[in-house]
Amino acid sequence: MRYDPHQPYEVVRYRDELLPDNSVRRIYSNGVTEWRRRLPDGTVAWQDSRGQQGSDELLGEGIVKRIANGRVLYGKEQGYGRTAWIIDGRPTVTVNETSFGGRLGEVLAMIGLAGMMGAIVWPPLMLSPEEEEQLRAAAQQNLSSASSGVDSSTSGWDSDSDGGDSDFG
């Protein structure tokens, strides 16, 4: 899907709080709260204050697969703590206010340099199982080449490949 510059997108900001049990409470500006826990396989299980639950998986190339109550949608990480989503046909960008990248993105936007962050690249509306598997394989290849002998088995929240600015963590 291509973004229509005449159609505004919604911006939903969020802040993450690391809890004593190593899970995360994510508080969104639209009033929704999520409780998130990273699983051993790297996916993130979550439930929210609306009674929804599901999982998030970083597929590769910045694509996040979200399963919410059995429904699949995709996000596309944009950098600067931003992730683009199409939620029920509405273009939405989530902004991580907890991360350095998210705060830097806000500063650039405030001083009129939002163009430095690049245009929004919207996620696919759907992917085939084969396309998802190709993205997973590419992500695994990138992880393997980047690790160069470093143990990447950590399950901490700070182990995201882009320094924790993603919407995935």
Image (spheres, grey):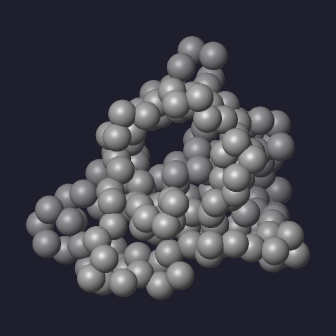
Q: Quadrant of residue 36?
A: top right
Name the residue located 42 percent from the left edge and 67 percent from the top edge: 91
Residue 36 appearing in the image: no
Name the residue located 73 percent from the left edge and 63 percent from the top edge: 59
Q: Quadrant of residue 101?
A: bottom left
**Horizontal and vertical percent position of residue 84:** 47, 65
Instruction: Judge left or right: residue 54 versus residue 129.
Output: left
Residue at the far top in the pictured view: 20
Name the residue located 69 percent from the left edge and 72 percent from the top edge: 126
Badge count: 0
**Horizontal and vertical percent position of residue 58:** 69, 57
Residue at the far front in the pictured view: 88
**Horizontal and vertical percent position of residue 28:** 39, 39
Instruction: Judge left or right: residue 8 versus residue 73.
Output: left
- Foreground residue among 4 and 133: 4
Name the residue located 58 percent from the left edge and 44 percent from the top edge: 169
Residue 37 versus residue 147 in the image, above or below: above
